[in-house]
Image (spheres, coloured by chain):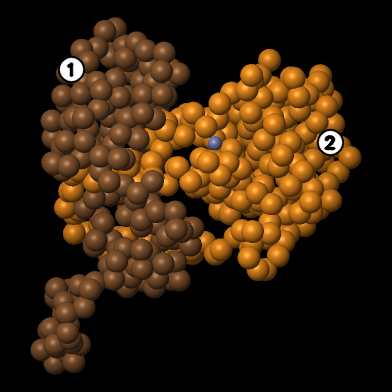
Amino acid sequence: MTIDLHSLMAPYALDALDADERATYEVHLEQCDDCRSELAGFLETSSRLGELEEVAPPPAMRAEVLAAARRTAQQRPVTVLAPRRLRHRVPQLVAAAAVALALAGGTATVVEHQRASDLQASGDKMTSVLTASDVRTSSEKATEGGTLRVMSSKSHDAAVVVGSALPQLDDDQVYQVWAMHDGTPRPAGLIGAKPGMVYVSKVAGADAFAVTVEPKGGSERPTTDPLAVTPVTA
Amino acid sequence: MPRGRIGRKGRDVSESPLRAVPTMAPPEAAPDAAELLQRTARGDEAAFAALYDELAGSVLGLARRVIRDPARAEEVAQEVFLQVWQTAVRFDPARGSAKSWILTLAHRRAVDAVRHDQAATNRDMAYDWSPGVDHDEVSETVTVRLEHEQVRRCLSSLTDLQREAITLAYYQGYTYAEVATVLDANPATVKTRMRDGLIRLRDCLGVEA
Ligand SMILES: [Zn+2]
């Protein structure tokens, strides 16, 4: 039996999921055509509930909003791996990462270091973890902002580790994930210069996951203090 | 649309060649919100201002409804518009209307604000409610001020549990698990009622699925 992620669509459309379920569902959403096609109508419906009362904004608010916009840079389209027709060519994972992590209010987030075929494969594996009946979620706030969330499944002996809203890094740095075994870190993958997510297999014995900033390409052992250590929920 | 604003302050209004344009031009449909939002995505500040004029009242009304505290609601409404400015490029007209997109952002932000603020006070509202809430009273306070006839009528066509599950979540910012506690119902049942209720609302409102 697997958790029915589709059943989270209605609560999602009403913003009635907690942060962990919301993140889990958003990953599912990018992989589930059924949900995507039905969600549009649900959101349109729920937003009608929000149209019931209009309140005249104070006049000063307009000027403040426009001034703030003038000072604020806009997001550019998410472009990764290939310059044209991304939506169709780039595997779902990229979109999933961008949606799950960027919708939360951060900037565009993509896994940049992997090849497209790897992304597709790891997207499938991620889905299997997220839909496992025994998936457990835990998260910790990172010291410099953002969170490190771990979704793990004993039956799959695997985990999906998600860094969201972590600070942007320089080009020559990456976020590296570590599986902590009794205080000993083992490399568990890179999530790129921007926060992203990584699939980790063979996690039996790992009691926590940590994330550090490492030089591009990653390190064999951590060279900086972890920004976050998220325990694995038993 | 710009007619009312041009020259509101400037003393040289009468000399402005712009002034005549809006009145002389043949009546033209105002650009719709989707177009304004797409122009906003390209950095068009005038389009963004027009979008603000069009939707600020709704966004603030929604934020007030969920957050209640007027000052906090204003703060959130401003954040919403800044987020609209920053992320307009993500709007996909194929996935829904611009108004819905913006109100969806606004609702999520309002709910997150409420949860954040309430986490600080241990969510005492939720605890106060749990010992045995009067179901009728809950839906009364939520629906009594509804102004929009159609939405109100459609909400009335739901079953009690559907309506309560939807309104507690949407207007109070409760998670479905909290709704389940408040209504003393099974969380799985609440999810189902939310779904059934949204489908019924959607069809009643004539929203294209
Ligand atoms: Zn689905």
What color does chain B have in the rendering?
Answer: brown
Quarter holding residue A47: top left
* Rendered position, A68 above or below A155: below
Residue at point 70%, 65% (across, down): A82
Residue at point 32%, 73% (across, down): B46
Residue at point 18%, 48% (across, down): A54
Determine if residue A215 is in view. no
Amino acid at circle 1:
Asp
What color does chain A have in the rendering?
Answer: orange
Q: Is residue B13 left or right of residue A124?
A: left
Kindly check if marks 1 and 2 are in contact, taking CB atoms under 8 A apart as contact: no
Quarter holding residue B135: top left
Structural crowding at the residue carrying mark 2, measured as other residues with C-alpha within 10 Å and reported as few (<14), some (14–19) or many (≥20): some
Q: Nearer the viewer, residue A128 or A186?
A: A128
Residue B160: x and y in percent read 24, 20
Amino acid at circle 2:
Pro
Determine if residue A57 is in view. yes
Front tag of 1 and 2:
1
Q: Which residue matches tag 1?
A: B136
Quadrant in which ligand 1 is drawn: top right
Q: Which residue matches tag 2?
A: A187
Residue B145: x and y in percent read 13, 35
Q: Chain of mark 1?
A: B
Q: Chain of mark 2?
A: A
Q: Secondary structure at mark 1?
A: helix
Q: Nearer the viewer, residue B36 or A175?
A: B36
Structural crowding at the residue carrying mark 1, measured as other residues with C-alpha within 10 Å and reported as few (<14), some (14–19) or many (≥20): few
Residue A220: x and y in percent read 89, 40
* Rendered position, A207 above or below A209: above
Q: The N terminus of chain B appears in which quarter of the rendering? A: bottom left
Marker disc for residue A66:
none
